[in-house]
Image: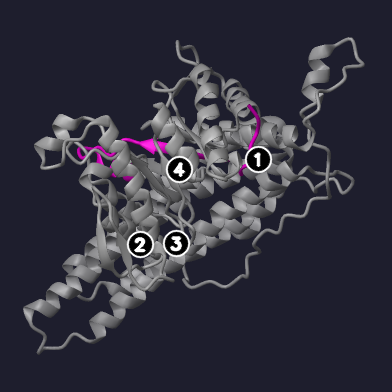
Amino acid sequence: MTDYGHQLQLGTFVTPSADAVEHVLEAAVLTELVGLDLVTFQDHPYQARHLDVWTLLSVVGARTSSVRLAANVLNLPLRPPWLVARSVATLDLLTGGRVELGLGAGAFWDAIAAVGGERRTPGEAVDALEEAVEVIRAAWDTSRRSVRFAGDHYPVAGAHPGPAPAHDVEIWLGAYKPRMLRLTGARADGWLPSMGYADPPDLPAMHALVDEAAVEAGRSPADVRRLYNVFGTFGRGDGWLTGTPRDWAEKLAGLTIEQGISTFVLGTDDLDVIRRFGGEVAPEVRRLVEAERADPRPPVATEPDREVAAAESITVAPTSAFAVRTTPDDGRRLSATRVWDESARPTGPAPDPARTYTADDLARGRHLVDVHDHLRQELRTVRDLVDQVEAGLLDVGSARTAINEMTMRQNNWTLGAYCESYCRVVTTHHTIEDRSMFPRLRAGDPSLSPVIDRLELEHHAIHDVLEGVDRALVDLVARPDGLPALREAVNLLSDTLLSHLSYEERELVEPLARMGFA
């Protein structure tokens, strides 16, 4: 087997538990915050303990801004493909091109039949899936005036295609048996198996079937992205994926280089595991793969110490001076209240002008800026929502009916729900820094300790400011004149958070590039 050269992606596979809604949403948002690429959910529409996956994906899409979204995998027997195509295209348009489509032929036929689905034989299920892929792609092809398809399972008689998705949505198939694997190679954009059903020793033979079918269909094997749902344990365990984050990274990177798997989706509902996967495992996987792709030849050890030589063989050569652009504080303030004395902020050591940095080093520095940019965008949305509520209140007069009042309350509820979500996002981001990033930097460069001490104090202060936003929201529900207090609370949040983010970038982006997150 070989590396197909696809862009490396890492994500999560979260259980859509109906009795833990807030936890599910927090795991999805955390997936984005820790720098992962993809959040996915299983789809079992007959499972009473699960949320509806498509509704869940829509809410997650609204609460995030960059992470990609997918069902893992969508239950085709209970979801007509024409409607699937419209749902996928709609959500892709609404999220700016962040949706991919995982499809499965179906399983648990008793449960499917119990809720009105068609019971199919294995052969019929594969036939139906093949038809569905054709129907979905035809539904997205708005260059056609109408679609006609004489399928046995999903006939289409002159339907008008559209809407088209915002980007070329990939169709990934969950496949294990030979016929499904051949269908994947011939027609799909990705193959999505899971550990437990296809363990690492089983993968090469399956890859071979996908590759053979791709060539027979006139395609390149590289046209099919290779994804893998993985499950693991940090520390001791009996499974294949166990040990330290470094152990995980070496095993996953090995699957990329040796078997071409480029997308790893971790099945977990544990927030700490998600943090470690995003903060410790993912950067190391990317570094190892990047190093191997840059120089795939085995190193020639000229030192007696072979272990040292092997470690040096994965070091990426320095590429440039430090060139990550941070976001300066423009000095503007919206509130007369001051939470802290900015002039008392300590500074860390100046960067070494002679030092050079690898592309991976620079990416680590940019990652903090990227996360902060997400928080800044969310803050702008909070302010926009306050403006919308204020505009609604100015329209309210004595002649307004109870319906108008309900609309006003709905505006308040929407603002409250968004602000509560945002407060959780900020708190989660600071928790990651306090527990993982800061200890690493403090140990790696003791001269940064005064800066880190100050940043930790500011985290606590920002928490108090967020509590003030919560109190203002509660008051707004009970008091029609509570909007000025809410606006002042959001102004104070803007001042403190934007100032803090700029200070943190100024002091930590270069040390992060030099020492890493965790």
Task: Mark yes or no: residue 436 visible.
Answer: no
Task: Out of 447 and 88, give the one closest to the viewer.
Answer: 88
Seen at 42% across and 65% down, the residue is 141
Of the numbered discs 3 and 4, the one sitting upstream in the chain is: 4
Of the numbered discs 4 and 1, the one sitting upstream in the chain is: 1
Whole-percent x and y of residue 151?
27, 51
Whole-percent x and y of residue 509?
68, 48
Amino acid at circle 2: Ala
C-alpha gap between disc 3 and disc 4:
16 Å
Mark 1 residue element: loop
Of the numbered discs 2 and 3, the one sitting upstream in the chain is: 2
Which residue is identified by label 1? 5
| Discs 2/4, front | 2
505 with respect to 468 (left or right): right
Which residue is identified by label 3? 378
Q: How many C-alpha atoms fall within 10 Å of the one at disc 2: few (<14), some, or many (≥20)?
A: many
| Discs 4/1, front | 1
C-alpha gap between disc 4 and disc 1:
24 Å
Amino acid at circle 4: Thr
Whole-percent x and y of residue 483?
29, 73
C-alpha gap between disc 3 and disc 1:
34 Å
Amino acid at circle 3: Glu
Residue range highlighted in magenta: 1-25
Q: Quadrant of residue 290?
A: top right
C-alpha gap between disc 2 and disc 4:
31 Å
Q: How many C-alpha atoms fall within 10 Å of the one at disc 1: few (<14), some, or many (≥20)?
A: some
Of the numbered discs 3 and 1, the one sitting upstream in the chain is: 1
In the depicted structure, whether residue 493 falls above or below residue 46? below
Seen at 67% across and 58% down, the residue is 326
